[in-house]
Image (cartoon, grey):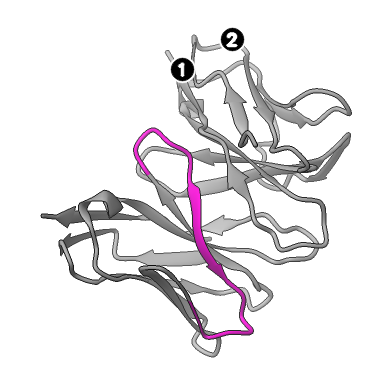
Amino acid sequence: QQQVKQSPQSLIVQKGGISIINCAYENTAFDYFPWYQQFPGKGPALLIAIRPDVSEKKEGRFTISFNKSAKQFSLHIMDSQPGDSATYFCAASKQTGANNLFFGTGTRLTVIP
Amino acid sequence: NAGVMQNPRHLVRRRGQEARLRCSPMKGHSHVYWYRQLPEEGLKFMVYLQKENIIDESGMPKERFSAEFPKEGPSILRIQQVVRGDSAAYFCASSPPAGGYNEQFFGPGTRLTVL
């Protein structure tokens, strides 16, 4: 059972455009939602994370939008650059008890010059 | 401040051999998680450990797989009698002691190939 669903599977964006990746979750006990960036042959790197007490968090060109009632959250990459080309994973976890991360299936982003 | 360290980075084993993967968490981190990533897939949780304790092993296969995090030294993920289906990237993550948010930092992974 996939607890976090992610879309699209792949995304091609022109340089300077906006990349948008969407995730949905089932478990209402989740209260921590990070996004990870992974380059080929590397481990996932924490990019940005949000908690459900806010609806949006912005760090530089990266923004997370969170909709608690719809159980959805998304990553927006503004002014996308070729260096942003990577696979992006959303994830969710609980802060107490078993707090392992449940990952989405990943989105392969390609930013073309 | 060194990040999470994993070794070896690449490991080749023949069917039936044992694979031993090591993970040293970030300095000051006492929680270790192991995840497995199959090609073109997301990461799947395997086990969560604190020093000398297995906290949650709900994602571990029931047979052939074991993990430990001793008082001294790295965390070890051990796979006995490997099969081709064990070929994957295995990632270790660490997080600070409880009280903060669950920010998990990942190592570079060990890519296991079973011939």
Mark closest to the chain's N terminus, 2 or 1: 2
Name the residue tied to disc 1: B114
Q: Do the residues bearing badges 2 and 1 touch, measured as CB atoms within 8 Å?
A: no
**Three-letter residue code for mark 1:** Val
Mark 1 surroundings: few (<14), some (14-19) or many (≥20) residues within 10 A:
some
Q: Chain of mark 1?
A: B
Mark 1 residue element: strand
Q: Which residue is mark 2?
A: B17
Q: Closest to the observer: B101 or A11?
A: B101
Asked which secondary structure carries label 2, the reply is: loop
Q: Nearer the viewer, residue A54 or A22?
A: A54
Task: Give the vertical position of A99 relative to B24 (above or below).
Answer: below
Residue A3 lies within the magenta run? no
Q: Is residue B32 left or right of residue A81?
A: right
Does the magenta-highlighted stretch encompass residue A40?
Answer: yes
**Residue B71 x/y as whole percent:** 89, 28
Q: Measuring from the top left, give residue A64's x and y in whole percent.
A: 45, 74
Residue type at numbered disc 2: Gln
Residue A2 visible in the shown view: no
- The answer to which image quadrant residue A23 occupies is bottom left
Residue B20 is situated, as x and y percent measured from the top left of the image, at 64, 18
Residue under the image location 17 percent in, 60 percent down: A12
Please give the range of residues in magenta: A39-57
Instruction: Say which residue appears at 36% left-offset and 42% top-offset.
Output: A39
Residue lying at the far bottom of the rendered structure:
A69
Looking at the picture, does residue B55 appear above or below residue A71? above
At 29% across and 71% down in the image, what residue appears? Answer: A78
Which chain does the numbered disc 2 sit on? B
Query: Is residue B54 visible in the rendered structure shown here?
Result: yes
Image quadrant where one finds the C terminus of chain A: bottom left
